[in-house]
Amino acid sequence: MIFPTVSADTRPIAQALRKRVQEMEEGQPGLYVLAAREFRYPVQQQEVTIQVEQRRQMNLLEKFLLQAYTEIVPRPSLEELAGALGLDPLFLKNTLQDLISIQSMVHDVYGPRVTDEGKASLCSETIAEPTFDETRYFIQDVILDKKDTSPFRLRSVREDFEDLSQYVDQDIIKFPSLRFVDDELSTLLQEWGLDLHDPDNNRFVTRITPTASPEIGWRPLSIFILYDTLKENPDEAITFEVRSFENKLVPRVGAWLETQLQQRNLSLKTLCGLREEDTFVEEIAGSENRHMEEPAIEPEVEERLTKIRQQATNHMRMQRDGQTVEEAAGISMQLRDREIHKTFLGALQEAKELIIIYSPWMNKQVVDDEFIALLQTQVQKGVRILIGYGIGRNQSREDRPVPPDLLQRLHAVQTPEGTPGIIAEWLGNSHAKEVIVDRKVHLSGSHNWLSYRGDRFPRGEIVYKVTIAAQVEEAYHYLAQRFIEHAKNLWRSAPTKRKLALSILTTLGYEGQALGWIRRDSNYGFIPFWLRLALQGISSDRVEQIIGALQEALILCCTSIGQQDPLMKEIVAQFRKVFKCLAAKDRHLITVFIDENLAELEQLDLELYIRELNAVGAQESEEKRQELQSSHSRQGSTQRQDRDGNRPRRNR
């Protein structure tokens, strides 16, 4: 590969979100992520100290002591109770000390006594453990419409994350004041869902005390700007997927942004992190100063492109629904921004026979040294290349004319036979943006093939790649007819343009039609050039397509040009080159050609020359066959010797 394709994804997608973007696009054909950015938004946090009371189920000894000293009068001693239970008094003494420590019992002059707290514990059969304090942070989040608490302070968020506040028409920094008074504590606990307050497990918050003033913190938020190409209504094509720091969907923010966009209160470029003045420098330069009216797309072309779009859309819908798309008969698939240029270059590199490109504009930034080198390499391989350009009705009034030195570089590329390798011509009056490769692949859409590389911020461009034979042929016929009409105008305009006209026809494979123009207008002086074009076609393995026109050329020369005409010498010299190449390509075909055109070949003294070529070719083929056979024999002999050498010898 001599041309480095632009494979880097230059969309404004945060590195941390690239995997998610890939999953979204692969999982939903037709969905394209224009941008994926990380923002931050303000939340309020306040540090508080929370007093918590934990209760537990009392054990049997605790219940026995509390019940005994509540119900028995006069109060018994520990020894009496221990004797009644048959236990060592030490057990009851330790339990009593525990109850005294938590103020469920006390000692007075009459001995152990149950306190009011102890009586309450006896009723609930639970014991209050010592209270403890916990530090928590109360967080108010308007974006998530959520109030929660955390044992940790908010994590710091990168300062280069843009503040979301400027993009939403909501007051997201208006936080209600918090009241931690006792009479509102139960309401506060219910509203915030504090994890420390869990009555079902006998844990209760008894007091909340602020230890710091409220402060502003930040949380991250990810926004994916989506373009759904399957939406029939363009106003519904752009949507937003918003995810919180917990990777949960935040539909309310997406709805805010969509409303802002529909009301034209939101700049999509700015949301994507781009400056308004330099986002599309190339487009501004080419469109703001344009005073000519762009031509409308022809109805038949629009109908053809609409059919392609519908097929591609149907294929993508099938893929989204999990259905298999049959590709044997060809497909129509959609390409988005970053895929377009890579696919375009790949198609050019894989071309074997013919490349046709129509692009309204052409500049040096795209048609640069590497691109021209790619085309030149393909020309040397026998690929024919036609480039059409121009959008205005008059070439002299084009607002973005192709630089003359760029055209000169393209026209300087020639085939090994000395014929034009790249034909780049102004056709004008068309907004078509189409590519045909080998009459097997068709690319069409909004991409300006030769004036925009596609390595800047994506412009939401769509291109359709079609391999359905009938549709590719329709596109080829349309572009071919445009070039043929241009060739007709060149042929009629001036003799100096006629070689170019012939080159266009033969590039499209119409050698017979080119010869017909020569015959019709008796421009026999162009026959040697036509033969060079035919030689180029034969060198490119198009023998079967050219052989009929070659026969007509032979007859034309014998019937219309005198033997003594100086032109005949040049024609015969070119015929010799053609037949030499033809003999090397297909000896059987050259034999048939001699038999069918013997009289004409003898008239031009070419019959003996061709037979000699054929004989030499046959001899060379036989020598190669014998050499190959001999090589196989030597190889077989060596292998037998190796086998014999490896056999174990028998003792005599």
Image: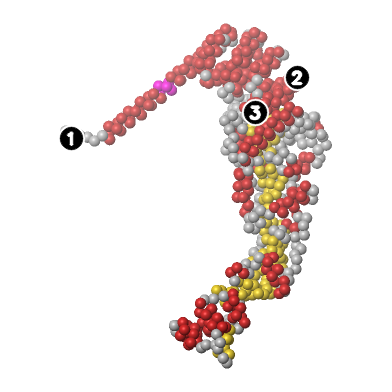
Q: Amino acid at mark 3?
A: Val
Which image quarter holds the C terminus? top left
Crowding around mark 3 (Cα neighbors within 10 Å: few <14, some 14 to 19, many 20+) is many
**Dominant secondary structure (helix, strand or loop) of the stretch shown in magenta:** helix
Q: Residue at x 52, y 80 (%)?
A: 64
Q: Earlier in the sequence, mark 2 or mark 1?
A: 2
User: In the rendered view, does 646 fall on the left or right side of 145?
Assistant: left
Q: Residue at x 60, y 41 (%)?
A: 4
Give the residue at the far right of this rendering: 291
Q: Earlier in the sequence, mark 2 or mark 3?
A: 3
Q: Which residue is mark 3?
A: 472
The foreground one among 227 and 358 is 227
x, y percent for residue 289: 81, 40
x, y percent for residue 531: 62, 18
Q: Amino acid at mark 2?
A: Arg
**Highlighted range, magenta:** 623-627
Crowding around mark 2 (Cα neighbors within 10 Å: few <14, some 14 to 19, many 20+) is few
In 3D space, how far apart are the residues under numbered discs 1 and 3 (Cα atoms)? 76 Å
Q: Disc number at residue 492? A: 2
Q: For residue 516, what is the image quadrant?
A: top right
Q: Disc number at residue 378? A: none
Q: Amino acid at mark 1?
A: Asn
Q: Residue at x 58, y 69 (%)?
A: 201
626 part of magenta stretch? yes
* Image: 300 above or below 575: below
Q: Which residue is mark 1?
A: 651
151 part of magenta stretch? no
x, y percent for residue 464: 66, 35
Q: Are marks 2 and 1 in contact (CB under 8 Å)?
A: no
The foreground one among 350 and 461 is 461
Does dot 2 land on a helix, a strand or a loop? Answer: helix
